Image (spheres, rainbow, N blue to C red):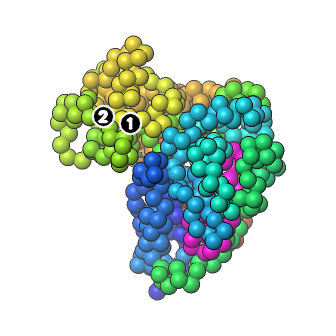
Amino acid sequence: DLRRDCYAAVDIGASSGRVVVGFVEDGRIHLEEVHRFDNRQVRRGGHDCWDIDLLYGELVRGLALCKEAGFAPKSVGIDTWGVDFVLLDADDNLVGDAVAYRDERTQGMFEVADAIMSPEELYRRTGIQRQPFNTIYQFLALQRENPEQLEAAETFLMIPDYLGFLLTGEKALEYTNASTTGLLNAETGAWDETVLARFNIPRRLFRNVTMAGACLGPVKPSIAEKIGYDTCVVLPATHDTGSAFLAVPACDLPAVFLSSGTWSLLGVENRSPLTTAAAYGENFTNEGGYHFRYRFLKNIMGLWMIQSIRRELNGITYVVDEKAIRKGRLHQYMRVEGLGQEVGFEDLIRAADEAECAGVQASIVNVNDDRFLSPDSMIEEILEACEETGQAVPQTLGELMLCVYESLARCYRDAVEGLSSLAGHGYKSINIVGGGCRDGHLNRRTAEVCGIPVYAGPVEGTALGNLAVQMLADGVFPNLRAVRAAIAESFDVQKVEP
Ligand code: ADP
Ligand code: LRH
């Protein structure tokens, strides 16, 4: 007997993806994770790319596993990281690869862009923070390296839109993720015609945006056969951060939200965009949210630094050819720590805890320096940054981890202070959702350094936000306020006092 009154969230982050089924029983929301898989970049044609075929295969497998777990979800929603896209030709075939946002192709594109429109004007129009990987800069890189791809292309789809297209054959550009391109007008929510024209980005590629909650369409018969049930794709906030912010059970208001995964996205929810010179100066973004909300936040380098360290210690190079990591000091680390078997996040946390207990004074790096976006070796890059600033160079894994944690926590504090000065009031708590809220060391240091309580959970905030919009679309809840209340009722949130 398959359960039908349930929904499936496909949530794919830069480090991992999962398929989570959600349903409501006795007024509470229940989640069941049916599939989890790794995501990472692959090297293709001289660029760091996403393996879209692999992700699509895992997505379909996850939907098939729903049935094995006893579920035949009424609808499926897909969210992924922002800014990245594919181009399709007139026959809907891919043009080029799905290049990943950390790829080097956008280097030097700020200068190109600034000669066309001042960054201040661009921000006033789009409200989007300046980041080298924004879609607009990826387009400028494409114009220079592969103009033939732009000529051949007829359709622009962002990653979750493309995965939805593969399932249904229907195309849409969902608003929350489209806002991360830096090509939407912050006020109108439509493509900014001036920006497109001035940057010579072909208008024909872009269909009008569709709001979260809309039904994309039924899955193709071939898919229904493969997964074992009929279902349809409903558009959630397809930007993962958009889904995550939806699911924050905000405690102790006014609260700061922190979606903690590969990135730390720290900010608040606003009812209108804030594109003042002060907001520009602090580099806060105004991403489009569900139902006329704006995510006013800052990207902080986040757990990417920790993931990268872990991968290196486990001998996994992030990028497979050409950019082999420099192994010199790395080997020394592994020898010093005697780390033979696979290193887990808990090992890294323990190393930091021990260094802290031993009274180690942490060296501090600027985590938001672009040097940490895609270094050949994260460990080496951190050591170099400490060396260059005349601080103690971490000699043990514990010292290294302490440096990362302290640097992240201070960056959080600066961002909270930036938010406070822009809003003209303080904040009473930080509400963390996402995989990073499992990190006890980071939660504690965040509370201590920021001087306000941290509320950690739910871990699967993003999948939950994705499910929330599907439930709203199906009338399970009357409005966002009601879903948020149900989320607060249904999940344990851990309070960490400063
Ligand atoms: P994304 O969606 O961006 O891929 P996640 O939300 O899955 O990221 O968060 C991944 C991060 O969560 C990891 O990089 C790691 O730092 C942290 N994390 C995951 N599991 C644990 C754990 N058991 N203990 C501590 N930290 C963890
Ligand atoms: C987090 C995220 C973030 C974007 C980045 C590209 O996964 O979507 O909001 O800035 O990836």
Q: Is residue 379 left or right of residue 23?
A: left
The relative height of residue 433 versus residue 409 in the rendered view (above or below) is below
Left-right relation of 478 to 335: right
Q: Is residue 169 magenta?
A: yes
Q: Residue at x 68, y 71 (%)?
A: 215
* Residue 106 located left or right of residue 16: right
Q: Residues within 10 Å of mark 1 (few under 14, many from 20)?
A: some
Extent of the magenta region: 162-183
Residue receiving disc 1: 376
Q: How many marks?
A: 2
Q: Amino acid at mark 2?
A: Arg
Q: Which residue is mark 2?
A: 326
Q: Position of residue 287 (x, y in %)?
A: 68, 45
Q: Amino acid at mark 1?
A: Asp
Disc 1 vs disc 2: Cβ atoms closer than 8 Å? yes
Q: Nearer the viewer, residue 432 or 9?
A: 9
Quadrant position of residue 345: top left
Give whichever of 410, 153 is nearer the camera.
153
Q: Is residue 117 visible to us here?
A: yes
Task: From the viewer's side, name the closer residue of 323 and 300.
Answer: 323
Residue drawn at (55%, 52%), measured in percent from left and top? 81
